[in-house]
Amino acid sequence: MASTRQGRVGPTVASWFADQVSAREDIVVDVVVLTEHPLPLTLTGAPGPDASGTLAVLTPRLEEADAYVVVTPEYNHSFPAALKNLIDWHYTQWRAKPVGFVRSTRTPPTRSWTPNTWPNWTSSGSCSSSSPS
């Protein structure tokens, strides 16, 4: 879940999505909530003790995933800074794995998402939006 703002709808959307996917027996869902894993904004080769602890928990979870679904809002026609920071800290874990998007928003979208407005993922694909009924 990519949003870290207070009052976000991401938890509701992520819970709905996880419930839908968990109905399949061949998929294991692991929801990563970025507010629970604060990463430093400065990328370093030697992260401090707090960052090292966060990375020790988060990195293996991302490494083990076969694919990702990112539940995210759109902020200012782009993705949240916390999502970009996660991508930067875990570049090798994301590489060559499929990525899908589920939009979380309080209001109807005013424009459609396109892959060229998002990070340069190493595997190509299309983005789609969904919302709980």
Image (spheres, helix red, strand yellow):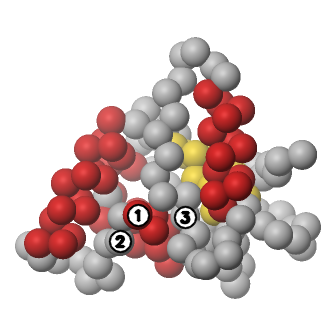
Closer to the observer: label 3 or label 2? 2
Q: Position of residue 35 (x, y in %)?
A: 45, 68
Q: Position of residue 40 (x, y in %)?
A: 29, 78
User: In 3D space, how far apart are the residues under numbered discs 2 and 1 (Cα atoms)?
Assistant: 6 Å
Quarter holding residue 2 = bottom right
Taking the view exactly as shown, the residue that stands out farthest to the top is 25
User: In 3D space, how far apart are the residues under numbered discs 3 and 2 (Cα atoms)?
Assistant: 12 Å
Query: Given the image, on which type of amino acid does mark 3 rest?
Result: Ala
Secondary-structure class at tag 3 = loop
Mark 1 vs mark 3: which is more N-terminal? 3
User: In 3D space, how far apart are the residues under numbered discs 1 and 3 (Cα atoms)?
Assistant: 11 Å
Q: Is residue 128 visible?
A: yes
Quarter holding residue 36 = bottom left
Marker disc for residue 36: 1
Is disc 1 surrounded by few (<14), some (14 to 19) or many (20+) residues within 10 Å?
Answer: few
Q: Identify the residue at image location x=58%, y=46%.
A: 69
- Above or below, 57 against 35 in this view is above
Marker disc for residue 38: 2
Query: Given the image, on which type of amino acid does mark 2 rest?
Result: Pro
Residue of label 3:
2
Front in this rendered view, residue 65 or 88: 65
Q: Quadrant of the N terminus?
A: bottom right
Q: Identify the residue at image location x=54%, y=24%.
A: 27
- Above or below, 55 against 27 in this view is below
Query: Given the image, on which type of amino acid does mark 1 rest?
Result: Glu
